[in-house]
Image (cartoon, rainbow, N blue to C red):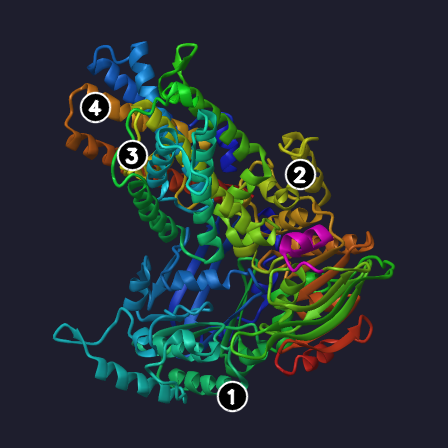
């Protein structure tokens, strides 16, 4: 954690502050610190919510935005710090406390019950009752009103699990509006909305703002912030690095402040390597979607020895699904996969690993590691057969240990003892341990799905160094990333995916931010 | 000082109150065992005699063998409610083979297998019951609770059906049929110690070795810790899960054989509610019902705690009603301590992390 504290606080002091506090502050969080096992999510962060304004909060993945919002919503409690509402200190020890104080939140991961109807979700735990029984008629008419305000004609009796994700998002917004909120926190509300739905949402936000409701708005789409925001706060690595009025800034300012000037050139390859002969040939990979269509739609491409192939696209473009097809995680996938001249006929994960394809999954906690096991036992999990005795029965602890130690050294995993639980490591070191697990299987092709998600900047550059070295050693690497700078800086060749198809291919020299974004079929950042 | 390393907290040299408390909590099953022994030794004269210890161990062996199989299942994140019924069915299969043999009606002959064959067939039958559990769970996506609940009824029903609810009595075999000696399994001794205790020791050692040293054992832990991650790591999830229930079925059949031999009779109601005693021993031994955490060593201690507790209470003349109350309280208390220990471990880890951040 020491590295974080060394970061200069200069940007914050130098930013123009005098007119930043024109409008009164309704809520002020001060000196908030929050630690999780392995990471310091928030480090002495202060954040103000201006009354009747849209307060944008930006930062890279893992900068601490969601943690800060969970604290304001009473879901998490800070280790240190105070929260004041209208200059009165308040305690938010549960979501009920937050609701009582008029703070509503729309979560990034939708907090809806998929098994219940739209109406029941909107009034969950706040049911309208008449003499002790639920007043369904009243709930229903209020729901119709709310949905009309959001300009949507979702049937109030539809089961939420049957709705499209964008529609579910609308229900979540309606649910927050159904409470009498003074402060509404929106955590990436537009990530699953279409362009016209976003316009409606912005109109609703404008309406709320005029009714003196304060909005905290988190988004990765920076142009949206310039369009709707009044104030902006930037978090980086758990610290609050800048507060500004949106009128005074532009897109470049946001990007530089978010990434840090010294980090802007992080993803630049340090040495060139030679690209060898074709290693992996993929033909006509298809993954049908439940309810028609394809998640992966007739995809064909090649990966060469020593090549880093970037796979760019927006969330839901089918990139992760494509990697899962290659790794054998999708039994229903069709098409042929040919690895150094051998067609892989088995569609099972263990056989694909034996053949030399290993996937480092996107969601580290859910799919990547076994939290209850030690660093060592996680690392050797995929390659246990290599540590057996001569009879092939019993594991030899000495072999396991020496393999683990060698990997810890090679990837410089920061761990005091390999018997330590993997959950006690920081995100970046957990990711290195998972890559080590892959390397111990002696793969030929590594599939890295968003390998830097939610890890700090220093660890990001280490992960990229490792990726580069692996390519230099002749491994084929497929790198999926949603961050333009990562893909542009790292990949030898870039495939862009949209709606399950490869829409374009760029060499390292042809690729530019504009070209990639155009190929995804959207103009928004 | 292994426990310090396992929590990932850097050791500072001096032993603090937290360390002592952590140590006691981690070894709580062992502490409970010592306590139980101490109390009964003080209150019940003759409790610590060799003869009494052997009797206790014989009872413990039954619980422990079942609990070893159950440990595999629970570590993998499942549950096996059918073990008591498989004990009963196995006893009836063994009893039937000895007293009635295998009738080949078309040939008009009855074959009486030797005792070794009886044991082998019975163990195989128990393993097949486990295989059916495993396949139901993995092939048809039935929750382990439901699949094994079904087997609880089916196996118990089959046990009753085997001899229309009657007992196979006097399982001594006949010299002219060459199938005598079944009672030796329950009554025989080696170096003055009954066979059942040796079997428990053998099962415990093998199970410990399998969980600690075999890839299969590692897969069981990984499966219970994170099923999806294990699958993506190349673990053959369905195969591992099926094997786990086969291990449990095998252990249950072994217990069925031991009980039938000790009684020299097979009764269809043998082993009723034994599954719950086995689960209790596993949980008392520190294995988490969520899977992925715990182990065989703890289970053996857990089995000793429960066995000793029951026998001690009987020796002291407690009513069976009171025995049940005490058993129940001990089990719930064990899990409460388990939860407290996890919370404490997390708190200590966070504290040291915040302290490190503050120092930096």
Spatial CA distance of label 4 from label 1 is 74 Å
Answer yes or no: do the residues labelled 4 and 3 have beta carbons within 8 Å?
no
- Residue at left offset 22%, top offset 84%: A137
Q: Position of residue B18 (x, y in %)?
A: 40, 31
Q: Nearer the viewer, mark 2 or mark 4?
A: 4
Spatial CA distance of label 1 from label 3 is 69 Å
Indicate the secondary structure of the residue bearing disc 3: loop
Write down the region rendered in magenta. A345-359
Pointer 3 chain: B
Marks 4 and 3, the one that precedes in the sequence: 3
Question: As drawn, is B310 to the left or to the right of A229?
Answer: left
Indicate the secondary structure of the residue bearing disc 2: helix
- Residue at left offset 73%, top offset 43%: A410
Pointer 2 chain: A
Q: Quadrant of residue A174?
A: bottom left
Spatial CA distance of label 3 from label 2 is 48 Å
Mark on residue A404?
A: 2
Pointer 4 chain: B
Answer yes or no: do the residues labelled 1 and 2 have beta carbons within 8 Å?
no
Residue B334 seen from this side: yes
Answer yes or no: do the residues labelled 4 and 1 have beta carbons within 8 Å?
no
Spatial CA distance of label 1 from label 2 is 52 Å
Q: Nearer the viewer, mark 4 or mark 1?
A: 4
Q: Nearer the viewer, mark 4 or mark 3?
A: 3
A369, B54: nearer the viewer: B54
Which residue position is annotated with label 1? A196
Q: Is residue A241 magenta?
A: no
Which residue position is annotated with label 4? B313
């Amino acid at each position: 954690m020491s590295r974080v504290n060394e970061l200069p606080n200069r940007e914050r002091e130098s930013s123009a502050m005098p007119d930043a506090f024109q409008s009164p502050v309704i809520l002020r969080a001060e000196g908030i610190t929050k630690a999780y096992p392995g990471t310091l999510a928030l480090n002495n962060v202060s954040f103000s919510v201006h009354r009747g304004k849209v307060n944008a909060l930006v930062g890279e993945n893992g900068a601490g935005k969601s943690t800060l919002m969970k604290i304001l919503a009473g879901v998490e409690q800070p280790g240190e710090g105070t929260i004041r509402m209208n200059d009165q200190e308040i305690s938010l020890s549960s979501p009920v406390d937050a609701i009582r104080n008029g703070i509503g939140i729309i979560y990034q991961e939708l907090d809806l019950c998929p098994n219940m109807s739209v109406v029941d979700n909107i009034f969950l735990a706040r049911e309208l009752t008449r003499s002790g029984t639920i007043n369904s008629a009243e709930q229903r008419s209020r729901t119709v009103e709310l949905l009309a305000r959001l300009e949507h004609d979702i049937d109030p009796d539809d089961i939420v699990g049957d709705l499209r994700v964008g529609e579910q998002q609308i229900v979540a917004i309606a649910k927050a509006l159904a409470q009498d909120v003074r402060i509404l926190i929106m955590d990436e509300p537009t990530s699953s909305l279409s362009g016209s739905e976003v316009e409606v949402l912005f109109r609703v936000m404008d309406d709320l703002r005029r009714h003196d409701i304060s909005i905290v708005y988190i988004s990765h789409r920076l142009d949206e912030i310039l369009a709707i925001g009044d104030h902006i706060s930037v978090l980086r690595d758990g610290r609050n690095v800048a507060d500004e009025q949106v009128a005074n800034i532009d897109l470049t300012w946001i990007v530089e402040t978010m990434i840090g000037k010294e980090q802007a050139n992080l993803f630049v390859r340090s040495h060139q390597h030679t690209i060898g002969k074709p290693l992996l040939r993929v033909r006509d990979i298809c993954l049908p979607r439940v309810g028609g269509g394809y998640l992966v739609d007739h995809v064909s491409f090649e990966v060469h020895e020593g090549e880093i192939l970037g796979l760019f696209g927006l969330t839901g473009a089918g990139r992760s699904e494509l990697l899962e097809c290659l790794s054998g995680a999708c039994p229903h996938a069709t098409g042929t996969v040919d690895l150094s001249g051998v067609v892989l006929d088995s569609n099972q994960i263990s056989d694909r690993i034996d053949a030399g394809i290993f996937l480092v999954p996107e969601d580290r906690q859910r799919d990547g590691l076994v939290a209850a096991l030690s660093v060592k036992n996680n690392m050797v999990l995929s390659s246990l057969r290599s540590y057996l005795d001569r009879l092939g029965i019993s594991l030899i602890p000495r072999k396991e240990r020496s393999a683990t130690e060698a990997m810890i050294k090679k990837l410089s995993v920061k761990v005091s003892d390999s018997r330590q639980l993997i959950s006690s490591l920081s995100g970046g070191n957990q990711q290195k341990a998972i890559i080590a697990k892959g390397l111990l299987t002696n793969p030929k092709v590594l599939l890295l799905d968003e390998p830097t998600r939610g890890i700090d900047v220093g660890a990001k550059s280490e992960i990229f160094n490792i990726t580069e070295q692996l390519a230099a050693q002749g491994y084929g690497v497929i790198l999926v990333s949603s961050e333009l700078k990562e893909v542009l800086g790292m990949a030898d060749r870039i495939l862009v995916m949209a709606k399950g198809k490869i829409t374009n291919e760029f060499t390292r020299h042809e690729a530019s931010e504009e070209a990639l974004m155009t190929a995804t079929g959207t103009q928004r950042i | 000082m292994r426990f310090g390393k396992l929590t990932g907290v850097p050791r500072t040299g001096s032993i603090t109150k937290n360390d002592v408390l952590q140590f006691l909590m981690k070894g709580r099953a062992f502490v409970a065992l010592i306590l139980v022994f101490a109390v009964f030794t003080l209150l019940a004269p003759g409790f610590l005699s060799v003869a009494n210890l052997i009797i206790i161990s014989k009872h413990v062996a039954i619980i422990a063998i079942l609990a070893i199989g159950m440990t595999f299942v629970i570590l993998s994140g499942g549950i096996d409610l059918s073990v008591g019924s498989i004990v009963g069915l196995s006893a009836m299969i063994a009893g039937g083979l000895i007293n009635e043999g295998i009738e080949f009606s078309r040939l008009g002959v009855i074959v009486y297998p030797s005792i070794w064959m009886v044991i082998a067939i019975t163990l195989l039958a128990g393993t097949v019951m486990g295989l059916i559990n495993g396949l139901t769970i993995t092939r048809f996506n039935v929750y382990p609770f439901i699949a094994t609940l079904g087997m609880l009824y089916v196996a118990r029903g089959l046990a009753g059906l085997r001899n229309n609810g009657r007992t196979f009595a006097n399982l001594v075999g006949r010299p002219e049929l060459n199938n005598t000696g079944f009672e030796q399994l329950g009554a025989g001794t080696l170096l003055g110690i009954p066979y059942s205790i040796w079997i428990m020791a053998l099962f415990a050692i093998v199970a410990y070795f399998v969980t600690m040293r075999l890839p299969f054992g590692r897969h069981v832990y990984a499966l219970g810790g994170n099923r999806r991650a294990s699958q993506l790591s190349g673990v053959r999830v369905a195969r591992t899960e099926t094997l786990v229930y086969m291990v449990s079925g095998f252990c249950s059949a072994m217990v069925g054989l031991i009980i039938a031999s000790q009684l020299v009779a097979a009764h269809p109601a043998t082993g009723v509610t034994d599954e719950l005693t086995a689960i209790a021993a596993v949980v008392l031994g520190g294995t988490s019902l969520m899977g992925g955490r715990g182990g065989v060593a703890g289970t053996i201690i857990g089995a000793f705690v429960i066995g000793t507790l029951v026998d001690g209470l009987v020796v002291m003349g407690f009513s069976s009603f009171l025995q049940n109350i005490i058993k129940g309280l001990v089990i719930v208390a064990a899990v409460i301590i388990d939860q407290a220990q996890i919370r404490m471990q997390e708190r200590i880890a966070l504290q040291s992390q915040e302290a490190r951040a503050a120092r930096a």
